[in-house]
Amino acid sequence: MKNNNLKITFSLIFVVTFMLFLSFAAVPLYKLFCQVTGYGGTPKIVNIENEIKVAEKKIKIEFNSDINKKLNWSFKPEQRSVESKIGESILAFYKAKNNGIESITGIATYNVLPFEAAKYFNKVDCFCFENQTLEPGEEVLLPVNFYIDPEILDDPDVKHLNSIVLSYTFFESDQNLEKISKSNN
């Protein structure tokens, strides 16, 4: 009987530990899956090693910005939109400003609409998923470099698109929350 209880106890401890591990691993694994596949509007981040073929068709890229209400920042694109040939490298900037009275760290996520176009939206360089610390009143330009993969023209579901939206949302970073909890203890 004791042997049976020990087996059940160790089995339950293993199951709980494994579930805890999976809960922590789920977010990074899902993020990686989305970046690789373009699923859920997440564009792929790439390194340009060989030249991309530029198509003659132009497409309009519209820029959007949002801020979580807990973050006392201003955040907006430097330009509302840009028109470019498909396959052509585009460099755009967003401006962020800390409107608070103390330094604060934010982190941005991004999305591409329509979702079906995300797998053709290739970021070469961006400020997303990186902590950005701004001092009180500090204002910075944040660059994003990307191109639209010419393979979009071969996809019957999206080849008709004339515009794509690149949307960023800034959130307060967990780094701030850790700093606040340490100062309250």
Image: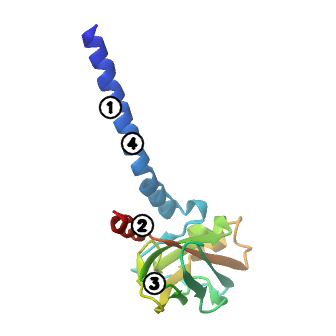
Q: Secondary structure at mark 4?
A: helix
The image quadrant where one finds the C terminus is bottom left
In the image, taking residue 149 as reference, residue 161 lies left or right, namely right
Q: Nearer the viewer, mark 1 or mark 2?
A: 2
The residue positioned farthest toward the left in the image shown: 3
Crowding at label 4, few (<14), some or many (≥20) Cα neighbours within 10 Å? few
Q: Earlier in the sequence, mark 1 or mark 4?
A: 1
**Residue tagged 4:** 20
Label drawn at residue 14: 1
Q: Secondary structure at mark 2?
A: helix
Kind of residue at disc 4: Leu
Q: Earlier in the sequence, mark 1 or mark 2?
A: 1
Kind of residue at disc 3: Glu
**Residue tagged 2:** 177
Where is residue 181 shown, x and y percent of the image? 38, 64
Who is closer to the viewer here, 9 or 49? 9
Crowding at label 1, few (<14), some or many (≥20) Cα neighbours within 10 Å? few
Q: Which residue: 25% across, 12% down?
A: 3
Q: Earlier in the sequence, mark 3 or mark 2?
A: 3
**Residue tagged 3:** 51
Q: Earlier in the sequence, mark 3 or mark 1?
A: 1
Where is residue 14 shown, x and y percent of the image? 32, 31
Q: Nearer the viewer, mark 3 or mark 1?
A: 1
